[in-house]
């Protein structure tokens, strides 16, 4: 699955993931989403209040700030913080599937967390095993 | 599986998880635990010294403090820190199963990390594939 | 799979993992790597610039510093920071497998993140399901 990001931050992909699962025609099993990058990650977070996303983006900017004297800055000041945020949040999620649906909680959404400033095309490997 | 939390912090659930795996009658496979919330997470940590748990709880309180000027505080000062701690630690774990047992290391315990101050009933989706 | 670490920091294990997957003779499926410890973790990170690894190691040393007044220090000053870094980065990774290869992105490498100062023998449980 490909996702085009336009800016740094959280981009909800719950709908696309649900669509993909439905197309597989598997009623019960295990869904795995794997983000094939080192500067974008996957997070499950609240899908209701937009303020949660803004607070979370600002928090990770403070936790892994741009001007921290990194040795590695080949691709600009957002390069190394992007790797750090990816390590902190992770690139993989596995979610049980029942009745053809990933069993997210009521308030859970799946987000691609883009850590680079410029737009990127991100590739997610999706896998579903079951019957 | 449902878990009732009484306070903020780490609650060991290793015993309940082992019991559930045993009941499935599957000798070898992959166990997945998925926490269906955005303010509680799953952590594998030391199961021996209680001081590790106290240090870890205090550490995450410092790392994602309550009074940090968050925009989102609909449900109180512990609301946004709970979402941040959940993003930092994650809501899913997969563990290989051999001889009907999740292959934890000697010192590893599975913990539900409750990030809200008040008691909550938390739902975990458990999945086991194998034969 | 056993991995001998010589010092604190990131140790690439991508080659050993690819070898293990190849030996299973499974073309398509899901690979899971589980680190059976509470003071070493698994991270997917950039496999090109060594400076990224040095920056990441220094960053986590700052994020979970040794002298922070921890109650638990039975095994020395690197003991509690090791547990915290493990909780922050995680002990499990699942990666889809296609054509007998874990589907890592071009720049992704799999690293064992050793958080103790002294050398350790670390055990990883590997699991591959598919056909």
Image: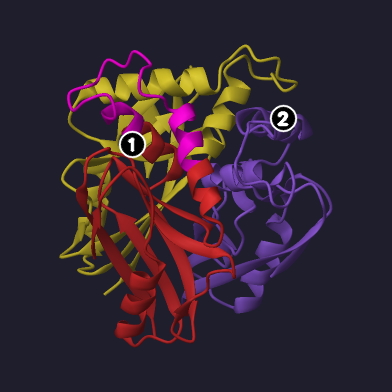
Chain colours: A yellow, B red, C purple
Q: Position of residue A50 (x, y in %)?
A: 22, 22
Instruction: Look at 54% across and 63% down and name the residue there.
Output: B108
Instruction: Name the residue rendered at 57%, 51% in the picture.
Output: C104
Q: Is C124 positioned to the left or the right of C6 in the image?
A: left
Query: Is residue B62 visible in the rendered structure shown here?
Result: yes
Rendered position, A86 above or below B96: above
Give the number of the mark in front: 2 or 1.
2
| Residue appearing at x 44%, y 43% in the figure | B89
Query: The residue marked by circle 2 belongs to what chain?
Result: C
Mark 2 surroundings within 10 Å by alpha-carbon count, few (fewer than 14), some (14 through 19), many (20 or more)? few
**Where are the magenta residues, as a range?**
B56-82
Residue B3 percent across, percent down from the top left: 25, 59
Compared across the picture, whether A85 is left or right of A56 comes to right
Instruction: Please identify the quarter of the rendering in which residue B85 is found.
Output: top left
Q: Which residue is under mark 1?
A: A111
Instruction: Give the percent coordinates (x, y) of residue B61.
Output: 43, 32
Instruction: Determine the image quadrant of residue A131.
Output: bottom left
Q: Secondary structure at mark 1?
A: strand
What is the CA distance from the residue labelled 2 to the residue labelled 1? 28 Å
Q: Is residue B28 above or below residue C73?
A: below
Provide the residue designation for mark 2. Answer: C58
- Between A104 and A117, the residue placed more toward the observer is A104
Q: Are marks 2 and 1 on the same chain?
A: no
- At mark 2, the secondary structure is helix
Report how many numbered discs are placed on residues in the image.
2
Q: In terms of depth relative to the viewer, which is nearer, B7 or A81?
A: B7
* Viewer can see residue A7: no
Please, is residue B4 above or below residue B85 in the view? below
- Does residue A73 show up magenta in the picture? no
Q: Relative to residue C2, is residue A9 drawn left or right? A: left
């Amino acid at each position: 699955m490909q996702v085009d990001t336009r800016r740094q931050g959280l981009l909800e992909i719950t709908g696309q993931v649900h669509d993909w699962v439905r197309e597989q025609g598997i009623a019960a099993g295990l869904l795995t989403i794997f983000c094939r990058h080192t500067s974008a990650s996957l997070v499950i977070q609240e899908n209701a209040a937009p303020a949660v996303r803004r607070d979370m983006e600002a928090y990770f900017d403070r936790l892994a700030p741009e001007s921290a004297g990194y040795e590695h800055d080949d691709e600009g000041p957002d390069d190394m913080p992007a790797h750090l945020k990816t390590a902190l949040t992770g690139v993989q999620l596995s979610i049980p599937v029942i009745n053809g649906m990933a069993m997210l909680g009521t308030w859970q959404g799946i987000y691609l967390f883009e850590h680079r400033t410029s737009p990127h095309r991100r590739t997610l490997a999706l896998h579903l095993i079951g019957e």
